[in-house]
Image: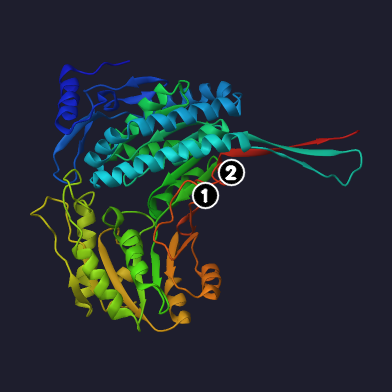
Amino acid sequence: MNSLSKAAKMSISSLASTYGIKNVNLLRTQGFIDGKWVGDSTSTFDVTNPATDDLLLKVSNLTVDDAHKAIKSSSDAFKSFKTTTARYRADILNKMYHLLMDNVDDLAIICSLENGKPVADSAGEVKYAASFYQWFGEEAQRLTGDVIPSNIPSNRIITVKQPVGVVGILTPWNFPLAMISRKVGAAIATGCTAVVKPASETPLSALAMAYLAHEAGLPKGVFNILPVDHATTKSIGELFCEDDTIKKVSFTGSTGVGSVLMTQSAKTLKKLSFELGGNAPFIVFEDADIDKAVEGALISKLRQSGQTCVCANRLYIHESIYDEFTEKLVAKVKKCKLGNGLTEGTTHGPLVHSRAVDKVQQHVKDCLDKGATLLLGGKVRTDLGPNFHDLTVIGDVTQEMAVAHEETFGPLVPLIKFSSEEQVLEWANDTEFGLAGYFFTNNYSRIFRLGEQIECGMVGINTGAISEAAVPFGGIKHSGFGREGSKYGVNDYINIKTMVIGGL
């Protein structure tokens, strides 16, 4: 195992001291393979704070050779880990849950530093991430098979559930803790082993989680972390897809990358679960509780400054309540505070990088050029830092504008009037994506009718918050396939073996 240089150790100590991180052991700058910290200071990449672009730490940039070692380690570990009892795996997951909860304050600071979200939101993510370890610890003991009646009197049909094997996991920057635990928790519960490549923007959260997994007693090789820079990411993804040792790939990210990974995986015919892009409609009907709908819009559209895959992307407001809804929404957004995620009172932080800021500006310009009305915000906020954009509300948006068809992934709230259920349903479904959708109504017939007709994997009805460990999370169409969390979350990590016993 390569050791860290004295300078690297000093920078960890300095970062912990500056931001009040008590458990310095959580700050790691090396990869984690086969139960060891690997990598040194000869090849690194920078992890920066998106609120300031200041350097946080230099992290070891592992290689494709390191990835091969991690896969072999995971494969070796699987031989014994697959035979462990459900109770053993449940106990480890429970320890991981408690360790995350015990370190929630420090993990929240680390997450906010590299991700930019307000520290209160980061603390919420830590708890959300921990909940998946708790949930899947409980699910581990429910992986039961079936006895199926046979039409042949002397036969018995029995099914058993077995782990698929080594899992390659690719996670995004916007939820650097929860997107790992939602996948790894299911893998461990079923007896799989995992190699994780976290996003290049947010490796520190992933490495902190690896440290806690080791502290929980997870055997070496079961959970490996490969921090790599953007240039190496493509090679690691290709390796995960084309190495036959890896039996499943789980990816959260863009539809474009998902399509590439799916093509590459065809060579090895492995299991896949993809959570990809979204373009969520948010509909407020004339009979809705307007105050409740406004609160739901704030949660759904502007959480993490609009940078979540299930964020409402286009808001459809019935023409009879449009003015009242708009007035109340703008008043609420005005009360939000944009700033550094670690500054007290901040409700919304920066975007992850300048490209995200540019995308918001493109959509704002397109709306205004085509006749929409700017109601609030609309500007890049360089006075706050390099990657800030106003929380922006635009009215009189139409279906012809780019924001109605492209995911913004930023703090832009476009308001579109509609007049009938039939019209808004057509508009809501006029997209290749199908991850999440939302609508507000007090008409219970409409709740079931529209809930079934909206073309997406998840529907929030009279709520803007749809994420918890019990929810089957995932989409349809170009938003991917497979489900994470819930009792269904283990399905993509198991094979069903059938044993037909004759001559009884």
Q: Quadrant of the C terminus?
A: top right
- Tag 1 or tag 2, which sits nearer the N-term? 1
Quarter placement of the N terminus: top left
Q: Which mark is residue 215?
A: none
The mark found on residue 491 in the picture is 2
* Helix, strand or loop for disc 2: helix
Q: Secondary structure at mark 1?
A: loop
User: Do we see residue 382 in this rendering?
Assistant: yes
Q: How is the image coloured?
A: rainbow
- Horizontally, residue 149 falls left or right of residue 295, namely right
Q: Is residue 117 above or below residue 6?
A: below
Cα distance, mark 2 to mark 1? 8 Å
- Amino acid type of the residue tagged 1 in the rendering: Arg
- How would you rate the neighbour count of disc 1 (Cα within 10 Å): few for under 14, some for 14-19, many for 20 or more? many
Residue 194 position in % (x across, y down): 47, 32
Q: Is residue 158 above or below residue 456?
A: above
At a point 19% along the width and 28% down the height, the residue shown is 16
Query: Residue 373 location in percent, x, y?
Result: 20, 77
Residue drawn at the location 23% of the way across and 49% of the way down: 352
Q: Is residue 178 visible?
A: no
Identify the residue under disc 1: 483
Total residue callouts: 2
Observer-nearest residue: 77 or 485? 485
Which residue does the image show at 36% across and 67% down from the upper left? Answer: 292
Tag 2 and tag 1, C-beta contact below 8 Å: yes
Residue 362 in percent (x, y) is at 22, 65
The quadrant in which residue 97 appears is top left
Res 217 quadrant in image: top left
For the residue marked with disc 2, what is the amino acid?
Asn
Q: Residues within 10 Å of mark 2 (few under 14, many from 20)?
A: some
